[in-house]
Amino acid sequence: MLIPRLLVQRTLLRSLPTTRVLFSRTLHVKQTLRPLAHTPSVAKFSRRNIVTTSASTTTESTSPSTTTPVQNETETDTQQPPVSLYDQVYVGPLEQTYKRLKLFSITSLALSTTLAPFIFVVESSLPMNARIALAMIAITTSASSTGLVGWCGKSYVTQLKYIRPEENGGAEGMEMTTMSLFVKPRITRVYDPSFLVESGRPFAKWELAQTVVLSKEESEGERRVEPGQEETVAETRDKDGKLLGRWVVTWGENGEGTCREIGSVVRCYSVHEELLP
């Protein structure tokens, strides 16, 4: 019995140090983990990640809400009321073409007039009569082309707009801008567009009527006129507002009116009717 007990004790004694070593190693490992435990910093880092993620999530979630007002504004823009007729301005598409053509014609006329005297100065075998004829032909040709360009472009309307009735004595009017030969604006106000009729002049669509006749209802109604009464139908002014001319109607019997020009008024107008507002 003694031998087995000794064997048991030896076995226990041998196993006991081993258990202590293992236990001490386990404790050592736990002790090394304690100082290296960065749980707070990891938690903070995790919170930052959460905050960043939530911010990005918030941004993503709010992005549809930010685009919604833009869509609403776009829809609102498309649903805006139409522009009033009196706020629209007609612009002639050939305005720059006529302007450049007039400037070119005036420049060529000035050059031909300036250089014509040199024909008599330069030594040549041409007789004096031939030189005079050559100079006259050059000047006449240039002047004729310039005059033709000015006549054709005088009636071209570069801008047109309608006048509100409250600004025109209770009736709708029209204001048209044309250019003179020297490219200076001429602004003509037609106070009664019913005086505009179809023109038979080349390079013109409308013109101020020479004679008019009121209907019986008009002559006896609100628009009653007396024989000898005069009215201003249209006025032409320069860009500074200086009056250049008027188109005046003189009424006779039975509502018949005869128009005449006082000063220099633009009577004919060339417009692109398909582009009018």
Image: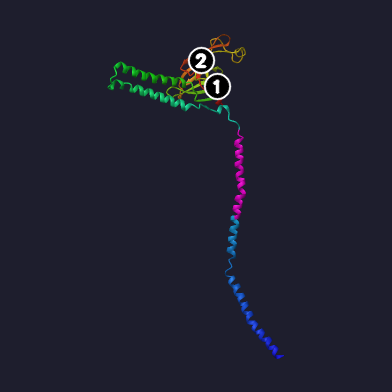
For the C terminus, the quadrant is: top right
Residue 271: x and y in percent read 52, 23
> CA gap, disc 2 to disc 1?
16 Å
Q: Nearer the viewer, residue 96 or 172?
A: 96
In the displayed structure, would residue 99 be above or below residue 45?
above
Question: For residue 248, which numbered disc appears in the image?
Answer: 2
Q: Amino acid at mark 1?
A: Gly
Of helix, strand and loop, which one carries label 2? strand
Residue at point 61%, 51% (across, down): 58
Residue 209 on image: x %, y % = 53, 15
Q: Main secondary structure of the magenta part?
A: helix
Residue range of the region highlighted in magenta in the rendering? 53-80
- In the rendered image, the residue lying farthest to the right is 1
Outermost residue, top side: 253
Q: Secondary structure at mark 1?
A: strand
Q: Which residue is mark 1?
A: 173
> Sequence-wise, which precedes: disc 2 or disc 1?
1
Report whether 102 appears left or right of 20. Answer: left
Would residue 4 appear left or right of 79 to someone viewing this image?
right
* Frontmost residue, 267 versus 270: 270
**Magenta stretch contains residue 63:** yes
Q: Residue at x 44, y 19 (%)?
A: 148
Crowd rating for badge 1 (residues with CA inside 10 Å; few <14, some 14–19, many 20+): many
Q: Quadrant of residue 163?
A: top right
Q: Please give the count of numbered marks on the rendered protein.
A: 2
Furthest residue toward front: 125
Residue type, numbered disc 2: Val
Depth check, front residue: 265 or 150: 150
Residue 37 location (% of width, % of height):
59, 68
